[in-house]
Amino acid sequence: MPIEDDAGLSALLAGAEVTVCCDGFTFTEGPVWVAADDCLLFSDIPNDRIYRWRPGSGTGEAEVYRAPSRNSNGLTLDRAGRLLACEHSGRQVSAAPYDPGRAPDQAVTPVATHHEGHRLNSPNDAVVHSSGAIFFTDPTYGLRDAGITGEMSFRGVYRLDLNGSLTPLDRSFSQPNGLALSPDERVLYVGDSEEQVIRRFTLRPDGGLRGGDLFVDMRGDPRPGGPDGMKVDEDGRLWTTGAGGIWVIAPDGTVLGVLALPEVTANICFGDPGFSTIFVTAHTSVYMAETRVRGIAPGSRGT
């Protein structure tokens, strides 16, 4: 598989080629592996659907899991195993039970919709803390695509606590997008897809943020793509979409390499039973590649 600027990335990959899981979509996003059902869920934002793909399916064989999805983007699981969806046209973060034995007809419950009486912009991506708190970003991409003027005066990073309290943690981003917690939950990484940077915050014991130093700078990189979805592995390396493909960055900020893909990458997750396979949503297709590392299963923190 093509690796650019290799400074150790090849040692983290299992050597297999990047392969296509399924294709024929419009703009894929928000992948999450559901271990309880041995499947991958992902969004196709313009087509207003969440799809489900299972290992062993042929190329292109993904079934519709939820339609409409209110143009969902980022997906993840909370500690109760519910599917969380960041909805662009819904302008909310929603939750729904995931039961492998049932069709996805359960009621979808909004869990974050407003701040101080104003509707959110278009929630984009989320990560769940071991406390059960949900951290999510709220850029304006969904508003822009729909030609809607938003009610919020900022594009924030939020924390939603179990009691329903919604707290803006940072208001300084141009377009906050992907985010990820370090394995010890002391660091929150947040990407700005407009500014083409990833910032690193210290997560305080009270759930607030401190710092926000520049961690990765893709400004000036002529390759297509930029910071969007991101995940960490168990050793704290950050795997993020970026200019040219998937960037892998050590905790000290060293770029270990860039895994090139045929399309501009949008998001990433770890999956398969060992959580050592990366799944990458990239516009019309979903790709996969084997690694020698382990990701952190969504909803597993604190269990």
Image (spheres, helix red, strand yellow):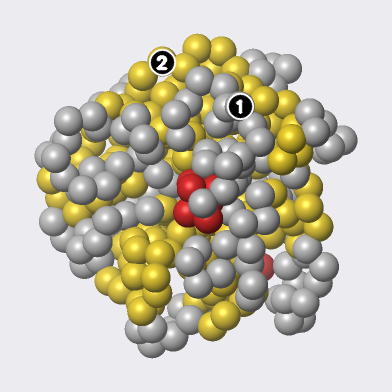
Identified at 31% across, 33% down, the residue is: 196
Expressed as whole percent of the image width and height from the top left, the position of residue 59 reads 35, 83
The secondary element bearing badge 2 is classed as strand
Image quarter of residue 158: top right
Task: Please provide percent x and percent y for residue 184.
Answer: 56, 29
Q: Position of residue 277 (x, y in %)?
A: 40, 60
Q: Measured from the top left, where is residue 113 in percent x and y?
A: 75, 44
Q: Is residue 215 above or below residue 111?
A: above
Front residue of 147/129: it is 147
Of the 4 image quadrants, the one containing the C terminus is top right
Which mark is drawn over residue 213?
2
| Amino acid of disc 1 | Ser
Residue 273 vertical placement versus 144 (above, below): below
The residue sitting at 35% across, 63% down in the picture is 283
Given the image, on which type of amino acid does mark 2 rest? Answer: Asp
Residue at left offset 46%, top offset 34%: 175
Q: CA distance from mark 2 to mark 1?
A: 23 Å
Provide the residue designation for mark 1: 153
First reached walking from the N terminus: tag 2 or tag 1 = 1
Position of 10 with respect to 70 (left or right) is left
Q: Is residue 271 left or right of residue 129?
A: left
